[in-house]
């Protein structure tokens, strides 16, 4: 009897929790889930929109925690899809650096203002895009993967990924000058952030940001995120490589401007 009553209370609390979420939250969650899926399908920069969109209805820290399970699930599909398309040297450099940056984010989460990190990411992204625009007519040779730059930008990517799931701009600043084939570019990003996102789970648990009710809540969004992941796979394959990279740079600029605005105005 006690067990039945306990289960009934739990079910009632879950129903009440779901009902407490506004229609605006569900719309934002569906859009954010689609952004997560598209990012794992091949457009990592789009994933940066997920936390700001969901933050329109819930606090940013909670938005990041709610979305982490979506990243973890869609990471599985991304890794399967791009398991043969990645750059080994870049991953050998970026994965250790990214994990180190994630640990720094975890250790300093109580001290570093999220607005500062948001502003910093935006300024770096805009600077990169401005440099790319000014040098657009210059034919530049591909820059090889370098240990020093890779360790720096990989650490920054891990840190910003932990704070707000926004590790894509640092990754792109380091990798875009290498002019990798588009599937290798996407696959390297997918495998890197799959590892970092998996490592975030115990860190988020330790900070009390992942709860049973939150997991139940995001189960409703899984189908949308997975469908968007497959849509991303298709788009990457059909877009010409030059157009793909132009899209990435333009998306980086738009999102970086948004991040600067958020950082300045909170």
Image (tube, rainbow, N blue to C red):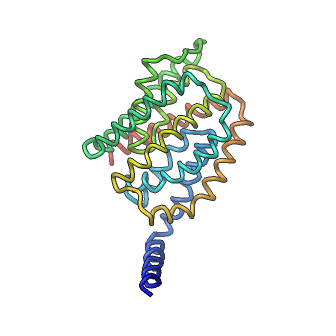
Measured as percent of width and height from the top left, residue 191 is found at 57, 36
Q: Residue at x 66, y 41 (%)?
A: 80
Measured as percent of width and height from the top left, residue 25 is found at 48, 64
Q: Residue at x 40, y 35 (%)?
A: 121
Residue 122 visible here: no
Q: Is residue 158 above or below residue 200?
A: above
Q: Give the farthest residue toward the right.
A: 238
119 left or right of 45 in image: left
Choose between 43 and 71: the one closer to the eye. Answer: 71
Q: Is residue 73 above or below residue 15?
A: above
Residue 8 visible here: yes
89 left or right of 22 in image: right
Measured as percent of width and height from the top left, residue 94 is found at 48, 28
Quadrant (top left, top right, bottom left, bottom right) of the N terminus = bottom left
Total marks shown come to: 0
242 left or right of 175 in image: right
Measured as percent of width and height from the top left, residue 23 is found at 50, 69
Which quadrant holds residue 232? top right
Q: Residue at x 46, y 50 (%)?
A: 51
Q: Give the farthest residue toward the bottom.
A: 1
Q: Residue at x 55, y 24 (%)?
A: 176
């Amino acid at each position: 009897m006690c067990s039945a009553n306990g289960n009934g209370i739990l079910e009632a609390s879950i129903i009440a929790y779901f009902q407490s979420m506004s229609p605006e939250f569900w719309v934002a969650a569906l859009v954010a889930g689609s952004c997560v899926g598209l990012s794992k399908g091949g457009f990592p920069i789009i994933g940066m929109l997920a936390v700001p969109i969901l933050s329109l209805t819930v606090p940013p820290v909670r938005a990041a925690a709610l979305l982490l399970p979506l990243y973890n699930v869609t990471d599985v599909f991304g890794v399967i899809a791009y398991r043969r398309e990645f750059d080994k040297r870049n991953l050998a450099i970026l994965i250790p650096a990214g994990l180190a940056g994630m640990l720094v984010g975890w250790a300093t989460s109580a001290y570093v203002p999220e607005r500062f990190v948001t502003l910093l990411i935006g300024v770096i992204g805009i600077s990169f895009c401005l440099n790319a625009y000014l040098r657009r007519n210059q034919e530049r040779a591909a820059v090889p993967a370098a240990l020093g730059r890779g360790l720096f930008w990989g650490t920054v990517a891990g840190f910003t990924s932990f704070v707000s799931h926004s590790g894509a701009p640092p990754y792109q600043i380091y990798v875009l000058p290498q002019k990798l084939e588009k599937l290798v570019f996407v696959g390297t990003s997918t495998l890197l952030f799959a590892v970092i996102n998996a490592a975030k789970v115990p860190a988020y648990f330790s900070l009390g940001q992942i709860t049973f009710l939150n997991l139940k809540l995001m189960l409703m969004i899984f189908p949308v995120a997975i469908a968007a992941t497959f849509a991303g796979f298709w788009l990457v394959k059909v877009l010409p490589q030059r157009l793909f990279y132009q899209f990435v740079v333009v998306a980086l600029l738009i999102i970086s401007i948004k991040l600067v605005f958020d950082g300045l105005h909170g």
